[in-house]
Image: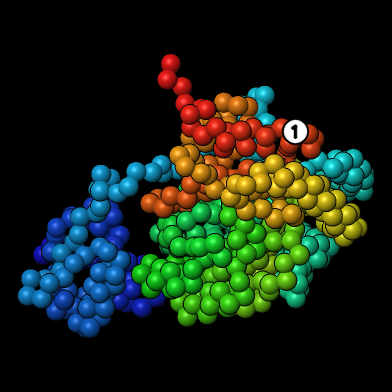
Amino acid sequence: MTSWLPDLSSGSGPLYQRLADSIESDIDKGVIDAGAKLPPQRDLAYDIGTTVGTVGRAYQLLRERGLVSGEVGRGTYVLAQQSEAATPEFIEPGVQGTRHIDAPPGKLRFDSTAAPDIGQGAIIADMLSRTAQDHPHEISSYTRDFPERWYEAGSRWLARNSFRPSPDSIVPTLGTHAAVMAAIAALTTPGDYVAFEHLTYSQISRSAGLIGRRTALVASDEEGIDPEDFERVCAQKHPKMIFLMPTAQNPTLAILPASRRAAIARIAREYNVVLIEDDLYGGLTEDPTPLMADYAPERTIVAGGLSKSVAAGIRGGWLSCPPAYRHRIRVAHKMMTGGMPFLLAEVNARLVLSGQAGDIRRRSIAEIGARIAIVRETLAGFVFRSHERIPFVWLTLPDPWLSGTFKKACLEHGLLIDDEDEFKAGRSEHVFHGVRFGVSQPRRREDVAGGVAIIRRLLEEGRAGYDSFS
């Protein structure tokens, strides 16, 4: 290691943190091999022009991250990364996840949670027609100027409980996913950590990985994310952001208590972490718990849209953010998506401002409630979590079912559901023995009843009713 020196020309934060990050990066790249001895603290301090105490803090941070070990009198050595054979077996979700790119034909779709079809197509068709007639020039061109009504629509749609975002905090987006990714792209840089729960809407973590962000996993329980583990991750990984779904978390349906929200806000403030609050499902509930934005308004970005309550195909979304972030996020959204199409943005705004989006949401919630009632009656006696206003169910599998095996059994019986690996944000040794299925996409309640009956039959029969020995 006599010829090695860390690159401290990039990064942010105190010098000891940048030094630790540089060493970690070189370990990941193979520049520093497992078993290598790091330079003595005094020598490295002299070489990079800092104090021995700064180098000591960097080495201690590396020990906390599990990258090195140190012994008095012997020095600091790089630990070998844990081998695949030493870890429990589990499937690492790829970039695609565990779903089919193209859904197999002829299967009942329990793998989607888009808004149910309650006749909103006719309303949207009329809105599209009138928008095209009113704005032919804007539709034929690129969108350069956003009218104020687009911001007002986002302000109204994201408002919930005591949270009332100002129109000048709003960024219109091509759906909630695009809103979250624009925030990540704008406020982090390649190599930065973004924190996620082990189980979550993992397409965000996969997308973040595609643009060079790293994932840090935070533990949760039945009430949601664990503040103590979040603080541990902040101390060890120094994430720049955390992605949260505090109300009706996907896929577990956990609702984070107010006390935990306050703790998360305090920790985020202490470690300078930006909070992304995905309230897409929260907007369907009547849960009175204050949003994260009420606890830490200076660092919370709230995202939401129309996909689960009005219509997924019109890509309606907005985010609210602190004023200092707004321009950067809007630019990032344009760079990543190509920009907002006038037709969709105008239709979405009209739906909200006319009150029709609210009417459709109320009708969607009523339909969801009727379908969840079918689930609760059919699966009585089994362990699952549901909410009468949320279009999916988190089912705990009895022995001896495994999540992936149960998903495959459902597929062979004509039913598409999601196994737990679809929701893993990164490589996780945790096994949850759960599956998620949605009830909003079948066109008729009778189809929902038939699909849930298949699930119950498989649960009752167990693996013996599925395994083939031929």
Apparent side of residue 159 relative to residue 324 in the rendered image (left or right): right
Tally of numbered discs: 1
Q: Whole-percent x and y of residue 450?
A: 71, 32
Which element is circle 1 on? helix
Q: Identify which amino acid the numbered label 1 is placed on.
A: Asp
Q: Nearer the viewer, residue 196 or 261?
A: 261
Q: Whole-percent x and y of residue 131?
A: 89, 47
Apparent side of residue 427 relative to residue 306 in the rendered image (left or right): left
The crowd level at tag 1 (other Cα within 10 Å; few <14, some 14-19, many 20+) is some
The C terminus, quarter of image: top left
Q: Which residue occupies 20% across, 59% down?
A: 79
Q: Which residue occupies 65% across, 24% down?
A: 105
Q: Nearer the viewer, residue 375 or 138?
A: 375
Q: Is residue 110 above or below residue 159?
A: above
User: Can the viewer see residue 348?
Assistant: no
Q: Which residue occupies 28% across, 55% down?
A: 28
Apparent side of residue 142 relative to residue 205 in the rendered image (left or right): right
Q: Whole-percent x and y of residue 277?
A: 61, 65
Q: Nearer the viewer, residue 394 or 116?
A: 394
Q: Which residue occupies 55% across, 44% down?
A: 435
Residue labelled with disc 1: 447
